[in-house]
Image (spheres, helix red, strand yellow):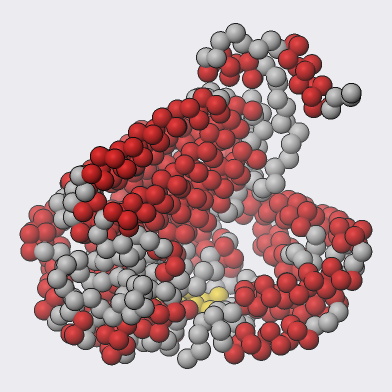
Amino acid sequence: MANIHDNPNRDAWVKKIAAANTLANGVKLLTDFRAKHLSPFKTDFSLELDGQWIELKIEEKVALLKHKEFNDTQFLNNSATGENAQKVADAAVAKINATTDMYEAERIHINFRLANKPPILPVNVFLDADRQLGTKLMELRNTDYYALPLEELRKVRGVKVITLQ
Amino acid sequence: MAISTATKAATDALAVNRAPVSVGAQEVHRWLQSFTWDFDKNRTKYSTKYKMANDTKEQFKLIAKEYARMESVKDERQFGSLQDVLTRVDAANRVHPKWNESMKVISNFLEVGEYNAIAATGMLWDSATAPEQKNGYLGQVMDEIRHTNQCGYINYYFAKQGQDAAGHNDARRTRAIGPLWKGMKRVFSDGFISGDAVECSINLQLVGEACFTNPLIVAVTEWASANGDEMTPTVFLSIETDELRHMANGYQTVVSIANDEAASKYLNTDLNNAFWTQQKYFTPVLGMMFEYGSHFKVEPWVKTWNRWVYEDWGGIWIGRLGKYGVESPASLRDAKKDAYWAHHDLFLLAYALWPTGFFRLTLPTAEEAEWYEANYPGWYDMYGKVYEEWRARGCEDPSSGFLPLQWFAENNHPIYIDRVSQVPFCPSYSKGASTLRVLEYNGKKHSFSDQWGERMWLSEPERYECQNIFEQYEGRELSEVIAEGHGLRSDGKTLISQPHTNKDGKLWTLDDIKKIGCVFADPLKAL
């Protein structure tokens, strides 16, 4: 069997990554890949073993394409999608601050990470927004932590019980 | 020539605050305080739901220079003892071989904990706004750097001066396959540096250091001495002299948030989760290392645990924090049940999974079996007779073709791994409190062994996505996995880990494992 570090899954993705030759293509490849293979909400587990390695390789490529296509001002202030980075971050923070539902806050935070984790957003903008989103999510999650019995919590989370001994 | 703004500010401040006439540490500390450092408006880089008060005090009031002077004296004593007298008396070769193996685990794992504690206390430095509180955390950052070096050094010393270096050197290369590594990273890494900054402090300082360093760093010196190891007490007691500062920092973290009304909504939940996280790993692993990794016994682990975790920490230490609204964790009672049998359950599994480790394990001798039965009545019927069967089938001999892992499959006792703690458990052959819970989420199955971990996962499943070895290597043959995971000695064929410490016993090679044809299977797929 193929080695865990060197296998056909990785080889196939190395070729796909090499074919991404514009920033727009690279961004789409990265955000689609994260949503399908790395999201905590994913239903496709086919790349459980190799997903993070592949993501790293796409990120490297996007960073290089960003460096090639952006000037210094764009590099510091824009998202790789071309939008103003701070506006993207502010919109996510405003959205989470408008909710009191922990599950909605969880989706906002996770989706923000999937769509914007560097090199999509510049690190300084991303990390500060991530701090604010994380703070709000933790406040909502940890309030009345034991309010629901486990049976109810399983239902709210949407899990199927396979066995309880 | 114009002077910089910073130089001018310092000159102006010195004009108002005259330098002290003596170099007494406390006076210098008071003088530094008079500069009215203002971090109130600083914003931290890290998420936290707590507000740390700007006027929090610190108990030690040590300035960095005084700190460095004190620590250098400790280092001189410690390294002087190790390099001079202990080397001359060949101390590393006087250690009982079983204990030599235990130190491969204890010191390598503690090194990871200390390394992460550097980052954890740096994060707390960034999060606090009170100058004194920052000063306390600064002292701890420097301590943790020192401790990381000390832990690394003791493995280096054992490897260079002692017996069977494999595992003392470069243990970390086996981290993908060793079943104890991931649980250790959960407590020592994730618990200390991810999530809420104050929750990390609770994990590190309030639970890890105030609760488990007594067993981990003090009790270990008693077990080491009893088993002929003079190096470990020399180093670990030197580490322990710093731990009081860390416990005080944990105390002050709680004091700093006590006046924030919102803190009461979160504090006891975070404490309960932190305690359960830490104890879920340390209770079985420390008990296993002490009792099964030694030849000469000190006292039953359950007594040590009861004295230091249940009474000293759960009662006295947490009791002192009661005035700030802190309560003993609700999970303490369940942990107490685990302290009796969990380490026996874990050793059974650790021995079964021995080829994936980086240290040698030994089956209990007849004399040790008597000790276990005397201190844990019922031990023989559950564990002792299984070890007798394994020994009779030749589990120590490479030519036997028998791995204890096969016994679990033959007897239909699947081994699961708890998704949250990453600790292996076998619900159908266990005397501990673990119970099997399997949930499916978006088509993937997750196993848990207790209600506290299940709730932690249900509350934030994205935090616990770590794959276990059965998921990673499903369908792979064991010898392939060992080779790929760097579980071999420098000859490229002999396993680092071995199922005995007998000097004259044969060592297992990759070929011996390959002949058996053991293939990894994920037990969750069968459900």
Instruction: Specify the quadrant of the image occupied by residue B159.
Output: bottom left
Name the residue at 38% across, 87% down: B477
Question: Viewer-proximal residue, A125 or B116?
Answer: B116
Residue drawn 70% across the image and 12% down it: B17
Rendered location of residue B73, percent (x, y): 41, 30
User: Observer-nearest residue: A36 or B472?
Assistant: B472
Instruction: Check the image and report above or below for A61 versus B293.
Output: below
- Asked whether, in this view, residue B473 is left or right of residue B80, the answer is right
A5 on left or right of A139: left
Q: Does B175 sit above or below residue A45?
A: above
Residue drawn at point x = 45 percent, y = 32 percent: B71
Locate the C terminus of chain A and report the quarter of the image it occupies.
bottom left
Q: Can residue A165 be seen in this view?
A: no
Looking at the picture, how far across and down is residue B443, in whole percent?
Answer: 56, 81
Residue at the extreme top = B21
Residue drawn at point x = 59 percent, y = 65 percent: B462
Above or below, A94 against B319 in this view is: below
Residue B526 percent location from the top left of the image: 40, 86
